[in-house]
Image: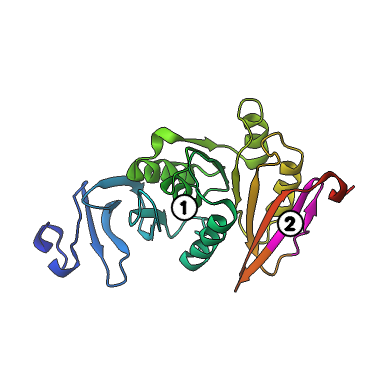
Amino acid sequence: MLSGKAFDIPAIYIRYIHTVNCKVAIDAMGSIVVIEQFAITVSHKEAVTIGRTKDINVMRVIAGSARGRNLIAPKNMRVRPTADRVKEALFSMLVSRLGEFEEMRVLDIFAGTGNLGIEALSRGAGYAVFIDSHRESADIIRKNLELTRFADRSKVVFQEAAAALKWLAQGEAPFHLVFLDPPYHEGHTTRVLELLADSPLVDAGTTIVAEFSSKEEVPSSFGRLRETERRVYGDTALSFLTIADRGEQCP
């Protein structure tokens, strides 16, 4: 354990931190606050440099092999990590619907921090692809994958969603589970679901989970995709979609 004197901050705030040329403190709420230079987060005394920033939020993997590991996301970024209570409810429903995650292929679109895809990997998913069009997000996803030791079972695609889906369709098999968690109120949910409805990345064994603002008007059907359930948690809505039977498909 490092001394507070070395960092010029009260010793009571220093816990499980290795220095990487930085001054940091953990506040009373468990957030890591950067005092100077580089921001890092540490789980069980493992340090990960994520670049220059002022402060970061700490999220944790809920279950599985990486249970309790911290994930990182700068507060000043465009990402809006899924709230813990929503993530817990989401994965509880997925376990009820799908059973075990063993060997699942997972696609995380607008991945942000990689929060959802990493949770699936922790629970046994065999492979995950993360799509995000912001360099900062892509870099943080890679760091979070290193921190949780899932880098060898994953791929990070730094590209806009539509272009990334087109590129992946050239070589990837269909995914078992697709997460779609775009910025709220920008119309991305509807546009990407329309693309997924015609994509070879989705087949009869695929479950899609779309997260969006409960105030947004998002249709329940997109071509061969049909919503099977929608749950609302305050400002957040979760929609579960699968390929409809041929007789139920929309024109």
Task: Kindly give the residue lying farthest to the right in the view shown.
Answer: 251
Tell me if residue 196 comes above or below residue 213 in the rendering: above
Amino acid under disc 2: Glu
The residue drawn where x is 87% and y is 47% is 247
Instruction: Let me know if residue 223 is in the magenta part.
Output: yes
Q: Which residue is tagged 2?
A: 227
Q: Position of residue 156 (x, y in %)?
A: 49, 37
Q: Position of residue 4 (x, y in %)?
A: 12, 63
Mark 2 to mark 1 CA distance (whole Å): 23 Å
The residue drawn where x is 49% and y is 38% is 103
Specify few, some or many for label 2: CA neighbours under 10 Å numbering under 14, 14-19, or 20 or more: some
Q: Position of residue 239 (x, y in %)?
A: 67, 59
Locate residue 142: give its quadrant: top left
Instruction: Let me know if residue 175 is in the magenta part.
Output: no
Which label sits on residue 21? none
102 with respect to 33 (left or right): right
The residue drawn where x is 71% and y is 41% is 204
63 with respect to 162 (left or right): left
Comparing 99 with 81, the one in front is: 99
Q: Report the magenta residues as a range.
A: 217-229
134 with respect to 118 (left or right): right
Tell me if residue 205 comes above or below residue 74 in the rendering: above
Secondary element at tag 1: helix
Amino acid under disc 1: Asn
Specify few, some or many for label 1: CA neighbours under 10 Å numbering under 14, 14-19, or 20 or more: many
Secondary element at tag 2: strand
Camera-side mark, 2 or 1: 2
Tell me if residue 150 comes above or below residue 68 in the rendering: above
Locate residue 63: give its quadrant: bottom left
Which label sits on residue 115? 1
